[in-house]
Image (tube, grey):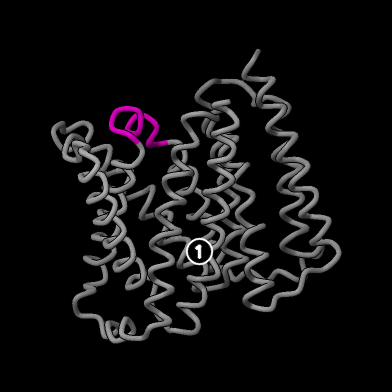
């Protein structure tokens, strides 16, 4: 039952996160909002709201700051994990598009597998290897329609994509002890707020000439949606690791491009071709296979 709960959480979180990609792309291309301004406003508001909710539920939100060791870990996670993931994701979208960013984000399982294999000094289970290969093959077909010619990635996008993959892997692996000690919501809330502060300080957001954008109802609606969906995605994604392994979490998050693709078709009038449909089917089949194989491995 706990395993099923973890799988449901990561699929839900990945779907919500996938929905934010096209929204960020729209804000950047249509509203001409910079990555730093977008992150500063969204993350600071989201972090404050989550902390208020935690306080209203009588949680001791200041506990992580009462120990130098824990507070240092929280700062590292917020800087490299959450802020690094957010900023590199938005920058990749900025120099390419949401689909390319989603594809490059899936370099993360490679980093996760390398780290865990080195830590345990052994090869990963064959079920995970097959699941990862099959899922990434499906992802390739989904995002390229079976042809490398249909995916044009600039060198800048590739660099940001590698950074994105690394920070996504770090985001997956690093906060496990923090979450067990203080709870997922408290850690996500503080990391979100700190990430927004980093973005604000780095860009001197108070001097920005983009504040007038928040006077437009459509942009405000989009920002509110990002705050809600993004915050829920964080909590579901990190919470899932209580019940399933980090490698499975990374690969099951393959549902993210499915969500991004559907939204792109409905909202941005993207076209879904034959090989993309094949890719979607492959992804679903191998995600199920990964889950079954992972369960057998856990039972062993």
Identify the residue under disc 1. Answer: 20
Q: Is residue 265 left or right of residue 205?
A: right
Indicate whether 28 appears above or below 137. Answer: below
Which residue corresponds to the image point at 67% horizontal and 57% vertical from the top-left? 258
Q: Quadrant of residue 224?
A: bottom left
Image coordinates of residue 255 in percent, x first then y, are 64, 51
Image coordinates of residue 8 in percent, x first then y, are 58, 40
Q: Quadrant of residue 123?
A: top right
Q: Is residue 6 left or right of residue 48?
A: right
Give the secondary structure at mark 1. helix
Which residue corresponds to the image point at 29% horizontal and 64% vertical from the top-left? 199
**Does 152 lie within the magenta span?**
no
Numbered range of the magenta stretch: 174-183
Point out the image quarter for the N terminus. top right
Magenta stretch mostly in which secondary structure? Answer: helix
Q: Is residue 117 left or right of residue 234?
A: right
Q: Residues within 10 Å of mark 1 (few under 14, many from 20)?
A: many
Indicate whether 213 appears above or below 138. Answer: below
């Amino acid at each position: 039952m706990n395993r099923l709960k973890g799988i449901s959480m990561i699929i839900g979180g990945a779907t919500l996160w996938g929905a934010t990609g096209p929204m960020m792309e729209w804000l950047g291309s249509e509203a001409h909002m910079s990555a730093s301004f977008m992150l500063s406003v969204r993350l600071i508001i989201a972090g404050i709201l989550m902390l208020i909710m935690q306080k209203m539920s009588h949680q001791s939100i200041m506990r992580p700051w009462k120990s130098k060791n824990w507070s240092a870990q929280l700062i590292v996670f917020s800087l490299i994990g959450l802020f690094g993931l957010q900023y590199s994701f938005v920058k990749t979208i900025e120099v390419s598009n949401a689909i390319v960013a989603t594809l490059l984000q899936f370099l993360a399982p490679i980093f996760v597998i390398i780290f865990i294999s080195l830590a345990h000094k052994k090869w990963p289970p064959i079920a995970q290897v097959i699941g990862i290969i099959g899922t990434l093959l499906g992802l390739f077909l989904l995002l390229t329609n079976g042809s490398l010619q249909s995916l044009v990635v600039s060198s800048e996008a590739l660099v940001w994509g590698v950074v994105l993959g690394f920070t996504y892997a770090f985001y997956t692996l690093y906060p496990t002890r923090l979450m067990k000690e203080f709870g997922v919501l408290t850690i996500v809330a503080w990391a979100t707020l700190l990430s927004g502060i980093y973005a604000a300080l780095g860009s001197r957001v108070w001097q920005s000439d983009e504040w007038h954008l928040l006077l437009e109802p459509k942009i405000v609606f989009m920002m509110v949606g990002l705050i809600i969906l993004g915050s829920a995605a964080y909590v579901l994604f990190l919470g899932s690791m209580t019940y399933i392994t980090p490698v499975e979490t990374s690969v099951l998050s393959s549902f993210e491009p499915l969500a991004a693709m559907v939204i792109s078709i409905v909202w941005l009038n993207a076209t879904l071709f034959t090989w993309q449909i094949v890719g979607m089917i492959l992804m679903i089949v191998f995600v199920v296979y990964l889950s079954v194989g992972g369960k057998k491995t856990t039972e062993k």
